[in-house]
Amino acid sequence: MSDWLSSALDYIPTWIDYQRELFDQPGVSLAIAHKGQVLLEHASGMADLATREPLTSRHRFRVASHSKTFTAAGIMLLRERNKIRLDDRLGEYLANLTPEVSDVTISQLLSHVAGLTRDGPDSGQFSDRRPFLSEAEFRADLSAPQPLAPGVTFKYSNHGFALLGKVIEKVTGEPYGPWIHDQVVAPAGLKETTPDFDPTVCSPFARGHSTRQPYGRRFVIPGDNLTNDMASATGFTATAGDLARFFGQLSPGAQSSILTAASRREMTRRHWRDAHSQLERYYGLGTISGPPGPWSWVGHAGGFQGTLTRTVVLPEQDIAISILTNAIDGLANVWFESVIHVLTTIHGLGAPGPETAHWRGRWWTLWGPLDLLPGKDKVLVAASGQLSPFLDATELRPSGIDEAIVASAQAFGDCRLVRGPAGNIEGVSIGSKHLVTEDAIKSEVEHRYQPSSQAT
């Protein structure tokens, strides 16, 4: 492992834990893999606010639309075995569909350009208002005229991936769940992943949670309901560690994978732009991609009742990131971008050198915390409460053992570490700002303001 990556892995858990507390989130589970090996698993907060069960890295989450990537991998595996072709018509595998639906291709279903309805006329299964659909129920939705002609534009469809689950069953002669587990999940080395909720193995299990408003509190959402014939679109449960392992294997350059490099390239390349989003976002075959560039990502998101989850792989760096949150307002979909921001910053900063290593730490004022992050020959001052903590970071250049020059900031000046009688670092002065430990700021603020608050 590179020294810069080790420095990043030391910092990311402390940053995300503060973010979780700042945004009042029940829990977060994070995993980062590099070159197929999980280097970091970290969890904090609660798996269940009602029981106060602490969240661990072994807790499984409902990861919802991550299921689509597993389903796509299963289709690609069957393609490698000459059991299916991407340009085959759906009607070659499934009977009793309308001519409109029969004519869509496997590739169009995988890339969400089949023009099919997203969830039919009632998406209540995703709001916990009804059970997830059976095959008969989603086929009934597909018997009506569909919204668009195939191949026109990107249009997300859970029903489309439900059909792909049925294609797998038709081709293999086996139920979707057992086949996808035996042929995709197990060969990928995933031991904490199931295609749907299974109470015999899904333990410990992270419960979902509602938003706090407008209820004045968060309600626990059990999240243990079966997804029935929608499992291939939204059923999976997994840990962050397993998802980082799996998505890392989908990188075209991965050294170990259940799929050939050609299949992985086809899955992860940008097939269609999401024209309905203001973000530069693309869809491949069961994968979502961001803008191109040296730190580009590809992966998937998931939104189940009470959980929001995100996993991506950075192909050029061979780094996979999985962030699982157990609340409807979870920040997984922005935190993964934040983690990439941290990685790119520390990659440029370099690993701590002998003159900077002892500058690492979190220091506080009344305005909140700042993080000192040492690099090869300089120290950055990160705003811990920001989603991009290094976006406007002050830069310190050490000029002595405990002295530094503020080399880049809105206001310039000197900086020094403040040591106590025993020689331990007790604070930092940056220009005119005096920062102290978390315990010290608690004591200071309570002493200053508590009497007046008691008086009122």
Image (cartoon, helix red, strand yellow):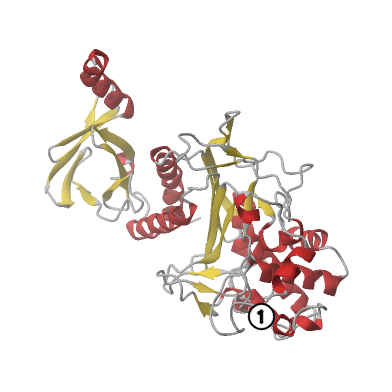
Q: Quadrant of residue 392?
A: bottom left
Q: Residue at x 69, y 56 (%)?
A: 235
Question: Does residue 389 appear in this view?
Answer: yes
Helix, strand or loop for disc 1: helix
Give above or below for 293 relative to 405.
below
Q: Between 10 and 292, which is closer to the camera in this rendering? A: 292
Taking the image as shown, residue 402 lies to the left or right of residue 215, namely: left
Query: In the picture, residue 444 is in which quadrant?
Result: top left
The residue positioned 48% from the left and 37% from the top of the image is 215
In this picture, is 255 found above or below 4? below
Instruction: Give the residue drawn at x 78%, y 59%.
Output: 181
What x and y, as percent, mark residue 435?
A: 23, 33
Lateral position of residue 285 relative to residue 74, left or right: left
Up/down of 249 relative to 16, above or below: below
Quadrant assignment, res 227: bottom right
Q: Residue at x 64, y 80 (%)?
A: 108
Q: Residues within 10 Å of mark 1 (few under 14, many from 20)?
A: many
Q: Is residue 258 at all visible to an observer of this figure?
A: no
Q: Position of residue 448 (x, y in %)?
A: 21, 20
Q: How many numbered callouts?
A: 1
Question: Image quadrant for the C terminus?
Answer: top left
What amino acid does circle 1 point to?
A: Ser
Circle 1 residue: 107
Describe residue 403's horizontal placement relative to residue 267 as left or right.
left
Q: Nearer the viewer, residue 88 or 212?
A: 212
Q: In the rendering, at what x and y percent does residue 2 appear?
A: 47, 56
Q: Nearer the viewer, residue 215 or 232?
A: 215
